[in-house]
Amino acid sequence: MKKTIFSLVASALVFASVPVFAGGGAVLEPPQHPWSFEGVTGKFDKQQLQRGFQVYKEVCSTCHALSKIAFRNLSDLGYSEDELKALAGQYKVIDGPNDAGDMFERPARPSDIIPGPFANEKAARAANGGAYPLDLSLIAKARHDGSNYVRALLMGYENAPHDMKMPDGMYYNKYFAGHQIAMPSPFSDGAVDYQDNSPETVQQYATDVAAFLTWAAEPKLETRKALGLRVMTFLLSLTVLLYLYKRKVWKDVKGH
């Protein structure tokens, strides 16, 4: 019985250590980017987050929803209340029922969730050849090494190898499992006009929107880190005090 259990555990460890293969090639690890929010004291670059939101709004939002984020949450990116009201006013949302029992359309408010591009999943699939565009609210947490994965995926489009036949409507991406993805490359150089003189390149767009989606998945990241530092400082101080108290008590005991 013990040998059987040991064999099962050993087999699990062996399979866990083997790289995943799909579509005839190994899944590549995304290159590591030096994000500003990494590390214990890391913080989001608000200017980068605003650029990332601009990329999402102008490119990604045509297919992908962001259903966990309300307009007012974007104040964390540095937008003022007036800017948020103006931004929300560009969208329409369904509300109701009114006194007559009917649903109606109205301009969005800062308290509203950012509307998605499709009314439901069936509408989304119908507009995308049967593929369902993922909600991007938590994508950076739903994927291993999410920030780097999203960035690499958006830059990972290439021509398929000569020995690999791509089905109609599929595109080759070296960072996607199986290397066949239904989403075409969303960016091209100069596709989004930045106002802060940042490079208008695919690499910059991918980096900025990946940072924004990381914030969307964990908007309280900076608060969590600050709280963690305070807790660790408190626990360290308490440990030192308890150690000194223990030494004093045992010194008196040994004296007797």
Image (spheres, rainbow, N blue to C red):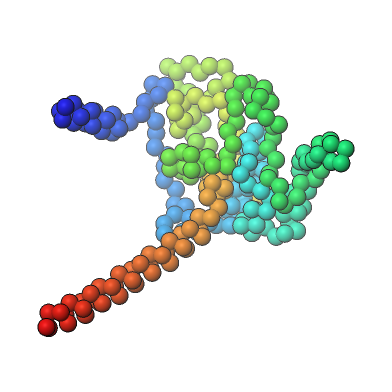
Position of residue 112 in the picture relative to residue 175 (left or right): right
Between 137 and 23, the residue placed more toward the observer is 137
Give the image quarter of residue 66. Answer: top right
Q: If the image is split into quadrants, where does the C terminus sit?
A: bottom left
Number of marks: 0
Give me the residue at 41% from left, 45% from top: 32
**Residue occupying the far front of the picture:** 256
Between 28 and 68, the residue placed more toward the observer is 68
- Whether residue 14 appears in this view of the structure is no
Position of residue 89 in the picture relative to residue 147 (left or right): right
Image position, residue 34 (x, y; %) = 44, 52
Give me the residue at 55% from left, 52% from top: 219
Image position, residue 48 (x, y; %) = 58, 53
Image position, residue 62 (x, y; %) = 67, 35
- Whether residue 110 appears in this view of the structure is yes
**Residue occupying the far right of the picture:** 100
Position of residue 94 in the picture relative to residue 34 (left or right): right
Image position, residue 152 (x, y; %) = 48, 39
Between 107 and 207, the residue placed more toward the observer is 107
